[in-house]
Image (cartoon, coloured by chain):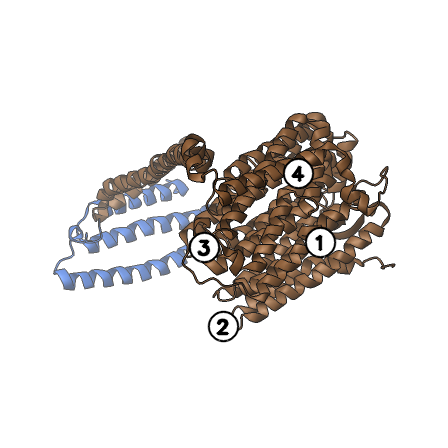
Chain colours: A brown, B blue
Amino acid sequence: MHISSIAPEFIWAIWWLPLAAFAVIAPLIRPFPGKAEPASYISIGAIGISFILSCWLLISVWNTDGHQILVNGLNWLDITNGPIFNFGLLLDPLSAVMLVVVTAVSFIVQVYSRAYMHSDPSYRRYFAFISLFTASMLGLIMSTNLLSTFIFWELVGLSSYLLIGFWFHRPSAIAAAKKAFLITRIGDIGFLAALLLLYSKANTLDILALNSSAVTAVLSGGVLTLSALGLFLGAVGKSGQFPLHIWLPDAMEGPTPVSALIHAATMVAAGVFLVGRMYPLFDAAPHALTVVGIVGAFTAVFAGTMGLVMKDIKRVLAYSTISQLGLMFLGLALGGVWVGIFYLFNHAFFKALLFLGAGSINHATGTFDMREMGGLRKKLPCTCACFTLAALSLAGIWPLAGFFSKEEVLTAAWDKQPLLFIFAIITTFLTAFYIFRVVFMVFAGKYRGSQRLHESSKTMLLPMIILAIPALASGWLNANGGFERLFVSEGLATNSFWDGIVGMFTHPLPWISLATAGFGILLAYVMYIKVWVKPDRLKGNLHPIYAILTRKYWMDDLYEKLIAGSLLYRGVFRAAQWFDQVIINGATSGLASITKTVASRTSRTQNGALQLYALVAITGILIIALVVILI
Amino acid sequence: MDIGLTHYLVLSVLLFGVGLYGVLSRRNAVVILMCIELMLNAANLTLVAFSRYIFFYGQAIVIFSLVIAAAEVSVGLATIITFYRQRKNIDIKNINLLKW
């Protein structure tokens, strides 16, 4: 079947439709009380059309020679002999795949939100923000210029902030929003510094130009490494990698669909996307790529261990997201763009499904605390099925989506870096264990809470069932090498679909990873269903480790007490306060008091004696006259 | 003796000095007003002398000056009369309300 190539107007529409939805909902629909529903229709309609256009775009990109479509845009700051910042659209497999992921997940999450947010008084605000977020994210993905990427990068940060703090009457939500905003700003400083450095050396911020000049060695080694590291620092902040990961678990204060969309599937993956987007630059700076791999591998294990002990279901999923993002970076560093993006692609679906499942569970039980759940299998059969499927996918069980992407990361690590492979395989084990700890604690056993349980409404279940399809099968897209060929054009043999599904079992690696994941699930089964090993006894025996994990390696304390408290509050801010109070305030009030004293002294000469005034005036004139004559 | 510009100027300086002395030392407000007129006329004398010996237009300025002096005297005298009605004297030492 031949599908004609997509017109530029339609490509633009992918971006401006959600933006228009935001522009309509925010100022136009909000003033009408009692009319909440249209907001969601507009928002969902816009993103639905965007999704269809994105699919069309993906096919067009696939059919285009060189797999690349460039759409010219506005020239910003168009000054004679000045810099040129073209805000156009760059569509290649990377952005096309990301577009499909973002629009698909956003569409599904918004449909789900209609039910989840149904009784919320700020229903319209919610859909306005979600549309704003989607528009910013789509802009971030499509932009040709790192400057506009940065602008959209900040805009998604803003939308994230607004949505984390959506329930702003809760102090914890405000604190979490602030934390997310500030911590990601630290990363963004790196991003901005990299932009400045790149612009000063390469005189352009055009992504294609930068990538090509990185390859053709216009940029020298040191500059390249520094700017790549700067960009990666931005990615670390946005994607919640060590040491800037602390905001992501707290970001779970936002509504659960938001966590699914922004803090699991799309925005946090923007860091992975950025590294993938600038991959030739990273590739030309091997040290930077090594850093990417090491940080990713370390974060994967580091966050995975914290996921083991969390009691809040969303926190487990948050640490899982951080850990999985670490694996994506590892995949990028060792396997190239497509490995990382393939992981991102699959992860977006099953992780979003896990979050939507958590939201459904929350609707039934009224809590996220797993100690007050249990035995939900019978009351929430559909949620249970979807959640378990996504959990299996996350754990990397054949033949679900997660298996195939994890396999690619593991293969890349096995081939290139055995040390990092160990990290990856430990992560596989941790992932399988903590996610099945959740599954068993929530769905198996007896119900420990006190709510009257009920399955969620169809509006919530249907999106979950739809998401379950890619969570099951999105990995199969690469079964005949199709996904890889989008990114890596030449030198790949096409194998049949069936070979792609089962063919890798000739290698020992899939067996190792499956065994590891199976062992993780088994251990969770032994501990939480059979209770042969009592979790509480293990907790007692391994108390120091348990304490470290529940205190999150004291990273929060490090930031709050040491950096924010001691260094900033008692150090820098106090010094600034002293400077302000003593130097600035002292100078102004000193000046004021001097003026006052002088005035009160000299005003005594105004004694009302007219003839004295005249005498002084005359004397003054005489002195002036004398001076004029003598000089 | 031939009378020249210098004589006029010396005379006007003397007149001005007398007037200034009066302004600075006398207590009676009317006398001070008269002394001010004296200084003004010293200046007028200079202008007239210059117009005679150097340049013609000084006379015109003197006419203006006289008009202004007349107006000034009327305002000054009116002020003094009002002051007298309030205080029953016109001693300049008592005119000192406007001070710190």
Classify B39 as above or below A459.
Answer: above
- Left or right relative to A387: residue B89: left
Amino acid carrying label 3: it is Tyr
Classify A4 as above or below A393.
Answer: below
Task: Work out whether residue A346 can be spotted.
Answer: yes
Amino acid carrying label 4: it is Leu
Label 1 sits on residue = A100
Tag nearer the camera, 2 or 4: 4
Q: Rounded to the nearest whole Å, what is the CA distance between mark 1 and mark 3?
A: 39 Å
Q: Earlier in the sequence, mark 1 or mark 2?
A: 2
Amino acid carrying label 2: it is Pro
Question: Which labelled disc corresponds to residue A447?
Answer: 3
Amino acid carrying label 1: it is Val
Residue in the picture at 48% in, 44% down? A179
Residue sitting nearer the eye, A601 or A428 = A428
Q: Earlier in the sequence, mark 1 or mark 3?
A: 1
Q: Rounded to the nearest whole Å, what is the CA distance between mark 3 and mark 4?
A: 31 Å
